[in-house]
Image (cartoon, coloured by chain):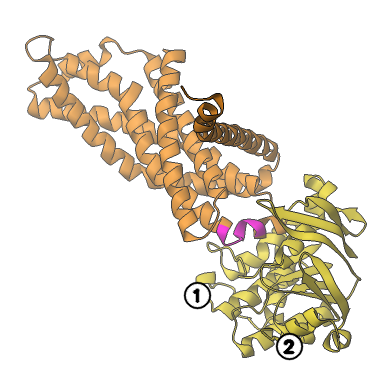
Chain colours: A yellow, B orange
Amino acid sequence: MIEFQDLHKGFDGKGVLRGLSLRIRDGETMVIIGYSGTGKSVALKHIVGLLHPDAGDVIVDGQAVSTLDRDGLTALREGIGYVFQFAALFDSLTVAENLALGLRRRRVSAEEIEDRVREALALVDLSGTEERMPAELSGGMRKRVGIARAIALRPRYILYDEPTTGLDPVTSAVIDRLMVRTREHLGVTGVVVTHDMRSAYTVGDRIAMLYEGRIRQVGTVAEIQETEDAVVRQFIEGRPE
Amino acid sequence: MLRPYCFWSSFSPVIEAIGRRSIAAIEAVGRVGHFMGDMVRALVDIRVWAPLAIVQMRRIGVDSIPVTLFIAAFTGVVLALQASYTFTGAVPLYFVGTLVGKTMMLELGPVICGLALAGRVGASMAAELGTMKVTEQVDALETLAYDPQSYLVLPRVIAGTVMFPMIIAFAMATGIVTGWLTSLALLDLSTPDFLKGLKLFYQFKDVWFGLFKSATFGFTITAVGCIVGLATQGGAEGVGKSTTRAVVYSAVLILLLDAFWAVVLL
């Protein structure tokens, strides 16, 4: 289970997260929605200890992330897959090497690495791209490789940072289907940060709206769709005012 | 006469600026100290950095040899010609060998090649790591449970520290050989005379001093490239700024280190 406990974080004196509290249950996919610049990605980075909170904490499997030492953080990260907004593939490595890198760190045998790379690429419909370089892939393919890199680790949690941003509607739908398939096949807990409402309705079990540094509302997809909160309604309907 | 209030208020922006800069400088020293501490701690992760250090040794060392030898060759030629020009009529010409040898080993081999490599190695390192930083590849590395210090920094710093003395040993030899060839071809100096001059004040310390200095330059250039690269912020503009910064800081530090080692070791 992942739990944000009264999380505060600011940059250059400006508060971004101002008391974020949210509990993500095991096995569910929680979608965090909100306007650009409201700190959705900042919240996600706290889960893996890429950012240190000013106050409050994130609890993952009973451990307060900000109190972990280097070894503790390494152990925590071994159980989490992270899909970056622009995939963050390593330019100098092939697709297969990108997927294998995290597995090597976990001391998985060479034969098993090969199997897992093949399996993960098949799951994202990219079999046969093992030897291609990231620069040779389209934006959608890069995102799918990013997801495959996370899946190959067989993590307990997968964090998706804006997985469909900048993609055409068809490729976005492919990524959405992939996230659903990942949860169904692997049973992982997912946290998806997005402002793409179609994607949120497709992949989310529950949706939480982050507004002014706090959770404005959290509920099932149906509850959010029927909300009477004016701020949430304006956002999900995409109305300018 | 100015009233005290006016006097202080006219100086306060200056004092504030000095204060801000002082704090920034102290913070920078703290960051570098922290970075070095992390680097030392990452040494235990030898399974990660050792194979990557071999790759970096080829990139930093072998790939830098052509440019370094080119610079050293022409430095040797110019040294021989300038020595002869300076000595004419006053000092025996075989001292050309002395000057070429001593200068290449003690000073110009390490410093000129170090400055050239600050451009080649330091800039490329800052640009590469800076790009990785702004495209979240460094964050990705951390989420894959790698320590950027052991995966990115240590291989480069160790490769630089080990390979710089080797490259510069070649540069010293090349400069002396081209100085000798120039003496033969243009200065009417025989090989025995050149060798006589070369051996005249030679001490083994000349070689190890030059090579030790080169190792410290290698460490400095690669560490600065990594520190500046990993501190990059923003997009392409940030990468550009980091690249320039890495070259400038490295060049300044090489000259400071050069003076420091001359005071301490000679």
- Give coordinates of residue A226: x percent, y percent: 86, 89
| Residue at point 39%, 46% (across, down) | B120
- What residue range appears in magenta? B134-139
- Viewer-proximal residue, A147 or B249? B249
Cα–Cα gap, marks 2 and 1: 37 Å
- Viewer-proximal residue, B53 or A171? A171
Let me know if residue B223 is in the magenta part.
no
- Viewer-proximal residue, B28 or A34? A34
Chain of residue at mark 2: A
- The disc at residue A136 is 1
- The amino acid marked with disc number 2 is Glu
Q: Residues within 10 Å of mark 2 (few under 14, many from 20)?
A: few
Q: How crowded is mark 1: few (under 14 residues within 10 Å), some or many (20 or more)?
A: few
Q: Which element is circle 2 on?
A: helix
Vertical position of residue B9 compared to residue A96: above or below? above
| Residue at point 18%, 31% (across, down) | B77
Task: Work out whether residue A228 can be spotted.
Answer: yes
**Label 2 close to label 1 by CB (< 8 Å):** no
Q: Which quadrant of the figure has residue B141?
A: bottom right
Residue on which the image places disc 2: A237
Q: Nearer the viewer, mark 2 or mark 1?
A: 2
Q: Which element is circle 1 on?
A: helix
Q: Name the magenta segment's main secondary structure.
A: helix
- Viewer-proximal residue, A7 or B194? A7
